Amino acid sequence: MATYCIGDLHGCHDEFVKLLNLIKFDEKSDDLILTGDLIGRGPLPVETMQEIFKLGKCVQSVIGNHDLNFLAVHYGLTKARPKDNLDVILKSKLREDIVSYFLKCPLLYLHSSKPLAVAHAGIYPLWDIKRARKEAKEVNRIFKDPQQRIVLLRNMYSEEPYTYSYANEGLRRWRFALNSFTRMRLCYHDCSLDFKNSAVNPESVAKDGLTPWFKLAQPMQYKKKQYTLVFGHWAALNGKCNELNIRALDTGCIWGDRLSAWRFEDDKFFSVKSVGYAAI
Ligand SMILES: [Mn+2]
């Protein structure tokens, strides 16, 4: 019995299957948690989702910014960009199943029996697990309501507010949760979010007062609770995050690099090479 996490799939179906074979994933006894961005840009989004559906209950994903974008496109709130390669899903018989699947994906996954937390971009540095769970649950409750869901998806394409405040209620508060769980990379030292840089080299932005969110996080909060936090989203890190109890899993399969898995029990990484197409 092992618990695995796999980084951002982005429709990379063939590598996903190869990686499951490499880790000898056993759907009868193993658990798999995906870091989100299951689709978007990559070549085989429908096949990727079919593979996930086939695995059934042993797999769970958190939602990523590309998955959210697909929902907004599905509801006609924004237009699909050709490079996102969403048309094949929009024309697919599985479109409604894929929409229902994403509507049920949490922003934050906490394992039921193991101290493991997974979020697409990470957990906002000023939040402990308890606060993060509360903020995530609130947004997931909004997604259950057909009308509120549309209002939120229509209003999610904004970067404000950049800082969290308990005074932020409603849309601004939900958007801050969506942005921090699914888009965050760099923060200023006061923990306000920056969305303009996706630094290949985090040191290169230090001069602008920016730092990766996980350097501002309080690792003790994860250590104290023995939680390990796993995130994807930031392909430029290429899996490098030297923080205690935080693991980065997006190793840029969609950019021609590799798809990675991580095993909770022994902190071991596995990866397969991208089959070689360039991102669309
Ligand atoms: Mn992402």
Image (cartoon, rainbow, N blue to C red):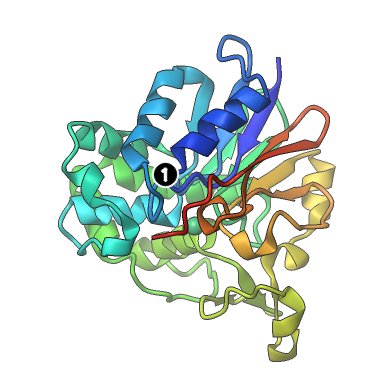
Please indicate whether residue 97 sits to the left or right of residue 247 in the image.
left
Quadrant position of residue 171 = bottom left
Q: Residues within 10 Å of mark 1 (few under 14, many from 20)?
A: many
Please indicate whether residue 272 sits to the left or right of residue 90 in the image.
right
Q: Position of residue 162 (x, y in %)?
A: 51, 76
At 66% from the left edge and 30% from the top edge, which residue is drawn?
A: 4
At 15% from the left edge and 57% from the top edge, which residue is drawn?
A: 76
Quadrant position of residue 264 = top right
Q: Is residue 4 visible?
A: yes
At 31% from the left edge and 37% from the top edge, which residue is drawn?
A: 46
Q: Furthest-top residue in view?
A: 28
Q: Is residue 148 visible?
A: no
Q: Looking at mark 1, is its residue's CB closer than 8 Å to ligand 1?
A: no
Depicted 257 relative to depicted 204: above or below = above
Q: Furthest-front residue in view?
A: 276
Please indicate whether residue 237 sits to the left or right of residue 135 in the image.
right
Identify the residue under disc 1.
11
Identity, as a three-letter code, of the amino acid under mark 1: Gly
Q: Position of residue 174 (x, y in %)?
A: 40, 59
Check disc 1 and report its element: helix, strand or loop. loop
Depicted 175 relative to depicted 30: above or below = below
Q: Looking at this view, is 79 or 124 the one in front?
A: 79
Quadrant containing the N terminus in the rendered view:
top right
At 61% from the left edge and 14% from the top edge, which residue is drawn?
A: 26
Q: Position of residue 66 (x, y in %)?
A: 39, 55
